[in-house]
Image (cartoon, helix red, strand yellow):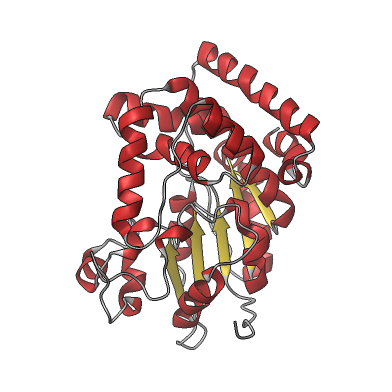
């Protein structure tokens, strides 16, 4: 791979699903010369075409920013974005090798920088396990953190009340795919998860999702344990790599914290944002919260005892940043 460019003005926003990423991207989207790429690792980017990008609301899917990057040589099942590989979505979540991800992201950033003063804002919900690798592109890396129970319960309510398993099941897919991570491999063995093969077109990703959905979308114990482990391991890997960690809960509740975070972002980017309308939901579910945290603390202790590298590097910071 040729020498990477260093993109000092690029903003990277890292989080999990339903953690305020779209809210932050909306703040940057209003800035002059900013090109906002929402979810650059989204599996749908393997099949989108120019028509989809042209009609996608920027504040919703963000695919409009990809319009000029659609592959001119359509693949089976759809055009897709140049240099994108559907395995970027989940397969390489904790991968140490870059597998072409940096070349792909550099292509997005170069597109944003074609205009004078232009810069890219990349909003990821699938990047926490690989922030260290993404730092090779330089830039300013924000990590958004939310209370783990509230985040889990948000996913669970989508499944329980709206019959939308997508968010909750992503964590199970990660346990099934990331077998090189001992804690996730142990979870996969405990629940007899299959080993999906995702290679080639988007159909392989869809087949893997459907296979897991059909067998495991109603297993609440698995959904909770998979979420907890991915949460702990992902933030354990990401927190020490962040230039700034933002508690979305504190940003909701504390006007002084809003001002402080806006100032820190302004000092680094030259753009001061207004967070006075931040509104992350805190759920009043004491019994469910207590049950969740009993398992959460047990998993923390297990990771601590195992000296898992992705935990030791940053996992011990999680509680202090949530306080």
Q: Toward the viewer: 158 or 36?
A: 158
Residue 187, compared with residue 17, is above or below; it is above
| Residue 312 visible | yes
| Residue 282 visible | no
Looking at the rendering, in which quadrant would you find the C terminus? Answer: top right
Looking at the rendering, in which quadrant would you find the N terminus? Answer: bottom right
Residue 310 location, x and y as percent? 71, 46
Residue 68, compared with residue 311, is above or below; it is below
Residue 222 location, x and y as percent? 48, 25
Quadrant for residue 45, please give it: bottom left
List the single residue furthest toward the top. Answer: 287
Horizontal side of 320 relative to 120 (left or right) equals: right
Residue 287, compared with residue 251, is above or below; it is above
Horizontal side of 303 relative to 271 (left or right) equals: right
Q: Toward the viewer: 140 or 230?
A: 230
Q: Toward the viewer: 211 or 309?
A: 211
Quadrant for residue 26, please give it: bottom left
Identify the residue at horizontal 65%, vertical 60% (top origin).
96
Residue 152 location, x and y as percent? 49, 30
Residue 303 location, x and y as percent? 73, 33
């Amino acid at each position: 791979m040729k020498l990477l460019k260093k993109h000092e003005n690029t903003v990277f926003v890292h989080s999990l699903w339903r953690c305020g990423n779209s809210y932050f991207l909306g703040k940057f989207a209003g800035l002059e010369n900013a090109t906002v790429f929402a979810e650059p690792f989204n599996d749908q980017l393997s099949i989108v075409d120019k028509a989809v990008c042209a009609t996608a609301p920027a504040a919703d899917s963000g695919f409009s920013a990809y319009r000029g990057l659609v592959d001119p040589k359509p693949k089976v099942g759809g055009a897709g974005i140049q240099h994108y590989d559907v395995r970027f979505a989940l397969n390489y979540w904790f991968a140490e090798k870059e597998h072409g991800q940096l070349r792909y992201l550099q292509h997005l950033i170069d597109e944003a920088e074609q205009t004078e003063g232009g810069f890219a804002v990349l909003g990821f919900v699938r990047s926490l396990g690989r922030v260290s690798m993404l730092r090779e592109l330089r830039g300013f890396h924000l990590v958004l953190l939310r209370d783990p129970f509230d985040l889990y319960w948000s996913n669970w309510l989508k499944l329980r009340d709206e019959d939308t398993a997508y968010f909750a099941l992503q964590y199970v897919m990660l346990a099934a795919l990331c077998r090189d991570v001992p804690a996730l491999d142990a979870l996969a063995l405990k629940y007899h998860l299959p080993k999906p093969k995702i290679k080639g077109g988007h159909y392989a990703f869809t087949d893997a999702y459907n296979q897991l959905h059909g067998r495991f979308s109603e297993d609440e114990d698995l959904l909770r344990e998979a979420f907890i482990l991915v949460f702990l391991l992902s933030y354990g890997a990401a927190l020490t790599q962040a230039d700034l960690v933002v508690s979305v809960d504190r940003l909701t509740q504390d006007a002084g914290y809003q001002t402080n975070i806006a100032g820190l972002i302004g000092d680094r980017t030259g753009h001061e944002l207004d967070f006075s309308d931040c509104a992350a939901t805190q759920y009043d579910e004491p019994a469910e919260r207590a049950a969740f945290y009993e398992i959460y603390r047990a998993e923390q202790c297990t990771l601590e005892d195992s000296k898992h590298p992705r935990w030791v590097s940053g996992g011990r910071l999680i509680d202090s940043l949530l306080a």
